[in-house]
Structure formats: structure tokens, C-alpha cells
Image (cartoon, rainbow, N blue to C red):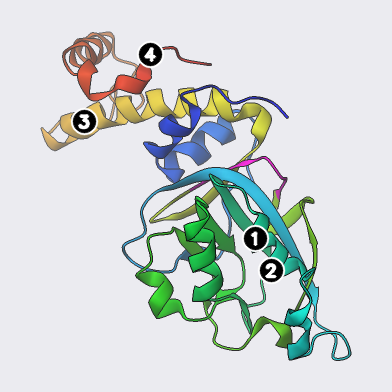
């Protein structure tokens, strides 16, 4: 698996999913933002981590009774116990939120093991508690029923679909208050550098638009005088952007 640049995850943590989706689109990736996946609570902090995947298929009555959790090889439980620190547990729940993908106890275990976050295109139970937890969590909507009613955990560490996006183990997941984007691993360094530079530029644009400037020539930056003004501003404010050095793109 490709080793990530030492600044990539830190840069991504300072970049919005909106900026990232645009950077990915420019590189030819148009389906990277997970649909109908949103933060569980309003206090969600930015999420950046490596994808660790779990796949559900529809439950079957002879297999998915409550006793199934007694099996220490149950894939849902194994995924929670083995998700490495710094990784995001991403669950393929087929977009079905009629039963929970997990609940607060499993997320507490992930939190204590150092997981960077958890994502499902289904729902979480105990969502009021999860909303208060110090782990970024994203789902479609709250769902109280136990997962065994609708979901059969089948495998770990394989490519999955989540929110209509193909997620491969090792991809980089980034989440903010708007949602979650999946960055293919092999372009993560380049996208992080491009998007971080774009963030610096858009910070400057915000100051200019607030000051009354027109969009034309500023956004996009096509006016030579404004290009010079941006470069001067960036030089003065370079201390605000310590991750801009050693760009990987």
C-alpha cells in the first residue's frame, strides 16, 4: 500500500469536503462524496483517517438471532476490536437505516482504541449518546432497532459501497459538518496538497469578497493585479499556513 506523505493527513484535516470534491473532480473523480450520510451530532469535529471496511448483507432469520453476538468471530464485533488506531470504520449497510449498524457501546470501544471515526450509510442506535461522544460519527439517520433485524455482517477488509461511493481499504476518509468524502489512496498526497493550497487561496478570496470586490478576476484568479495582491497577502500570512511547505503535488 502506498505510503502517505507526512503532511497529507494534517493538510486534509484543514480542508473542507467541498474543496476536496472540487480538487478530485479536476483530477477526474466525480463520485467521491457519500450521499445521505451526515454527522450524527451538531458538534462533530473534522474526521481524517484510513478506511477500514465492514460489509453487511440482508439478515436471514435462521442466522441472525440475538445469540449470534455470542460468537467471538462475529464480523461486526471483530471489526470493532480490530479496527486500527487512526482508521475510520466504514460500514456498507446498503443504505438501509431501518435497523442500526451499531450503537454507542461499540462506538465507545472504537473511541478507546483510537479510531479516527465511524461511517455508515445506514443508521446508528443510541444516537443522542453518540452525538455527545468525542468520536466523529456519520450516518443516514437514527435507528433504534438492533442490527440483526436487517443486517448480517459478512466480511471485513474488502471493497464496499457506502453512500453510493466505492470505498477500498486504505482509502482516505475525510469528514466535516457537511458530510464525508472518500479519497482514493493513490491520489491522496496530490489531492491534499492541491486542496490545501486552494484553501489558502479561498481564505484570501473571502477577505476580498467581504471587502466588496467583484468575483470577476478574483474567483477564479485571472486578473494579474489581483494575482500579485494574493501573493503578497500569502507572504504576509504564511505563518497561518504551516503545512504549505513541502507540497506533494
In this view, the residue farthest toward the right is: 62
**Contact (CB < 8 A) between labels 3 and 4?**
no
Q: Secondary structure at mark 2?
A: helix
* Quarter occupied by residue 5: top right
In this rendering, is residue 237 above or below 167? above
What is the distance, in whole Å, between disc 3 and disc 2 at their CAs? 55 Å
Q: Residue at x 41, y 55 (%)?
A: 178
Q: Earlier in the sequence, mark 3 or mark 4?
A: 3
Q: Position of residue 130 (x, y in %)?
A: 43, 72
Q: Which residues are magenta?
A: 167-174
On residue 97, the disc is none
In this rendering, is residue 110 above or below 87? below
* Label 3, residues with CA under 10 Å away: few <14, some 14-19, many ≥20: few
What is the distance, in whole Å, between disc 2 and disc 1 at their CAs? 6 Å
Residue under circle 1?
A: 81
**Contact (CB < 8 A) between labels 4 and 2?**
no
Residue under circle 3?
A: 214
* Label 4, residues with CA under 10 Å away: few <14, some 14-19, many ≥20: few
Q: Residue at x 10, y 32 (%)?
A: 211
Residue under circle 4?
A: 245
Residue under circle 2?
A: 77
Amino acid at each position: 500500500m502506498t505510503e502517505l506523505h507526512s503532511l497529507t493527513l494534517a493538510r486534509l484535516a484543514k480542508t473542507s469536503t467541498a474543496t476536496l470534491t472540487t480538487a478530485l473532480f479536476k483530477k477526474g473523480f466525480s463520485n467521491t462524496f457519500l450521499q445521505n450520510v451526515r454527522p450524527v451530532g451538531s458538534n462533530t469535529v473534522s474526521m481524517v483517517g484510513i478506511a477500514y471496511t465492514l460489509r453487511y448483507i440482508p439478515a436471514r432469520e435462521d442466522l441472525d438471532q440475538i445469540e449470534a453476538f455470542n460468537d467471538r468471530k462475529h464480523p461486526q464485533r471483530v471489526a470493532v476490536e480490530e479496527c486500527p488506531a487512526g482508521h475510520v470504520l466504514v460500514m456498507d449497510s446498503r443504505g438501509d437505516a431501518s435497523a442500526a449498524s451499531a450503537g454507542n457501546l461499540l462506538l465507545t470501544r472504537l473511541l478507546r482504541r483510537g479510531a479516527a471515526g465511524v461511517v455508515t450509510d445506514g443508521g446508528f442506535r443510541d444516537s443522542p449518546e453518540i452525538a455527545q461522544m468525542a468520536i466523529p460519527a456519520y450516518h443516514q439517520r437514527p435507528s433504534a432497532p438492533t442490527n440483526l433485524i436487517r443486517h448480517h455482517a459478512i466480511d471485513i477488509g474488502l471493497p464496499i459501497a457506502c453512500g453510493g461511493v466505492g470505498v477500498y481499504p486504505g482509502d482516505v476518509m475525510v469528514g466535516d459538518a457537511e458530510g464525508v468524502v472518500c479519497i482514493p489512496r493513490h491520489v491522496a498526497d496530490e489531492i491534499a496538497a492541491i486542496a490545501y493550497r486552494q484553501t489558502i487561496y479561498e481564505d484570501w478570496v473571502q477577505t476580498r469578497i467581504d471587502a466588496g470586490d467583484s468575483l470577476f478576476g478574483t474567483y477564479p484568479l485571472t486578473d494579474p493585479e489581483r494575482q500579485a495582491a494574493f501573493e503578497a497577502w500569502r507572504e504576509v500570512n504564511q505563518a497561518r499556513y504551516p503545512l504549505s511547505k513541502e507540497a506533494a503535488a
